[in-house]
Amino acid sequence: MKSFRLLSTPFLLVVLSAAQAETVSLPSMSVQGASAEEIPYALPTVPAASTDIGALIKRLPGANVNTNGAVTSIAQYRGLFGKRVNVVLDGFGQREAGPNSMDSPLSYLPASRTDQVSVYRGIAPVRTGIETIGGTISATSKKLDFGLTDEAEIKGSANAAYASNGNTRQLNLTTAVTNQNHRLQLTGSSDRGDNQKFDGGRIRSSEHDRDTIGVHYGYQGSGKAFGLDVEHFDMGDTGTVALPMDILYFRGENVKASFTDYSSNGDSYTLKLHHQDIEHEMNNFSQRTNGQVSPMRSRHTFAEVQAKGLGFHYQHQNWLFGIDLDQAEHNTTIYNPNVSAFFVDNFKDAERDRYSLFAEWKGEAPQGLNLETGLRYSRVEMNSGNAGVFAGASAGLIALNTAFNGEDLNQEENLIDIFATLTHTFSQELDFEVGFARKARAPSYQERYLWAPLQSTGGLADGRRYVGDVDLDHEVAYQFEVGLDWHTHQFAFSPRVFYHHINDYIQGVEGAATAQQQMVANEMSMMMGVPTSTLLKFSNVDAKLYGIDANWSAALSQNWQLAGTISYVRGERRDTNDDLYRIAPLNAITSVTYVQPTWQVSMEAETVARQNKVSDENNEQNTGGYALFNISGQYQVTPAVTMLAGVNNLFDRYYVNHLGGTNRAAGNPDLAMGDRVPGLGRSAYINVNVDF
Ligand SMILES: [Cu+2]
């Protein structure tokens, strides 16, 4: 071993320098968990300043998050976000109960319970999910290791953290009885935070409240593995100022089971089952003053999702075959607590069922190339029940309701996904990669069944009213990417250039709605005391996205390391001159770390360029560029005790995150309605982890 190389420290560091370097020099790595999938780019994590794993996702090259509230991070990858990105938690997809993605999949896994977040860099293999047009992001929760002998042992880890901004507290206790074959684990987590500060005031409401409790049973032995997770999720009062309402609660259960059998001839199969049942309430008056101006403007919404799924994957030599089925049913009803007769079924029994088959092949191709390729066929069947509306509603709204219920709401889409990734190893230090794909996505239930002109848009947070279109076509993307992995003992650099050509890209279009829909939208805006604006109708347009992202690291000496990521994406309409909405600006993270065997300190710069390539169609505003500086230190007190502390936004810089949305909550003296939501001011944090 050379004395001068990228260091791998015995513990994992939030600035990721060492771990990142390790990952880069090992182009694919296996992670623990139900799926034991190979993931090309993974970041080991230590929960630190934030209870939200969105903060970790942002550190992945090409990835970002749209932030609508304290723990409502919607994953964005290379400019595609929301339902276009397949987010997988412990190997399973997660459906949302909220029609505005208040419970984005990432919100279901608190940072304190997270073991690892990762992205299938570039084109996601078809095995990673149905509808992966915007890639696959994966996160796994902590699981304690199986024992080494027959003897039962009790072990665990406890984690407590505090951050000054918002008085944020997080606690996690994970404990298990294990031996070499069995693991019975109990996990609980609790997150609390008050309103967050920026230089100039507070964001109201940006409090959060989230508890989880989970029981896990795992078995491994004689070529078999079994895992069962039963999780209760309970989010309480949590602000989402970029949306028309705040969260009162999300509550419910997730059950996930997987069984894998490895046969002696090298074949294996995995069977997976999941079930999900989540209820949700939100309103526009408990954490903001909107409703109190007039009791007629108070709104209270009940929503729920019930989902289930089944997967069977069979691996034989270079082949992987699979069947994936899932079903989800969504309901959302809006009430006025002051008018008992008032109700509007925003979504009624909106159903989205997916039946899918795939095959993948991975192996050596001629000319020293390695090939990974696959084909997936999916049938997406969607339907909606007849929505109801109270008898005293306006004639216009009743007419829209009658028209919707009279439409053929039963729709199906046939989706074909194909991908191929070729890699060539030029030398020990240089790999070359090129990938092609065709990926498809069927409309979301919001895009298809939003019959009343409302803002239930899966968290677009542009403040606009939308209507859906039952007859939307599915999106088809043609994707191309090329990249290098260059890694020596002192240096690693992995750039990727990509281009996505998307036909029938779904977005809201002005002037597409009918005169009657526009009239009802105006009526509703006047009723709520907000200015009227042009209604957007979800429509098929044409788009393209292109850009570059890279991660790199360099060892300056035995003890000094540099590391960073840089991400750039440009999203444009092809049918008009407009730009795509809510695209992350050019951004980079650069860190310098001093490493010793039991401690390290790191200084980091987060630099973000201005974004003036904005969507006119969505009335999107430009935002300015900024640089934030963070410092952190980590100390391994004993082999079992790790402490991490730091200060984010050291100079308390005021800034606006382009993906943070605009303030929709009235009654905040520090922040007007319609103002961009500021990013977080200075926050000092400390995090202690004890293994036992
Ligand atoms: Cu909600």
Image: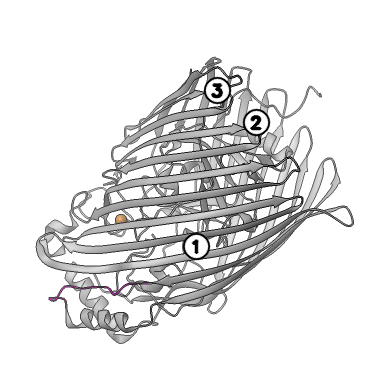
Marks 1 and 3 sit apart, C-alpha to C-alpha, by 57 Å
Q: Residues within 10 Å of mark 2 (few under 14, many from 20)?
A: many
Residue 153, relative to residue 626: is it above or below? above
Q: State the residue position of label 2.
A: 18
Mark 2 touching mark 3, by CB under 8 A? no
Residue 305, relative to residue 601: is it above or below? below
Q: Which quadrant would the N terminus be assigned to in this image?
A: top right
Element assignment for label 2: helix
Marks 1 and 2 sit apart, C-alpha to C-alpha, by 35 Å
Sequence-first disc among 2 and 3: 2
Respond yes or no on whether mark 2 lies under 8 Å from ligand 1. Answer: no
Total number of numbered labels? Answer: 3
Q: Residues within 10 Å of mark 1 (few under 14, many from 20)?
A: some
> Picture quarter containing residue 209?
top left
Q: Position of residue 98 (x, y in %)?
A: 34, 57
Q: State the residue position of label 1.
A: 612
Element assignment for label 1: loop
Q: State the residue position of label 3.
A: 179
* Residue at image location 32% in from the left, 75% down from the top: 451
* Residue at image location 41% in from the left, 63% down from the top: 621
Say which of marks 1 and 2 sits in front. 2
| Residue 442 visible to an observer of this rendering | no
Q: Position of residue 210 (x, y in %)?
A: 33, 39
Task: Give the camera-side residue of 593 and 434.
Answer: 434
Point out the stretch of residues depicted in magenta.
Answer: 384-393
- Identity, as a three-letter code, of the amino acid under mark 2: Ala
Magenta stretch secondary structure, dominant: loop
Q: Position of residue 214 (x, y in %)?
A: 40, 36
- Identity, as a three-letter code, of the amino acid under mark 1: Asn
Say which of marks 2 and 3 sits in front. 3
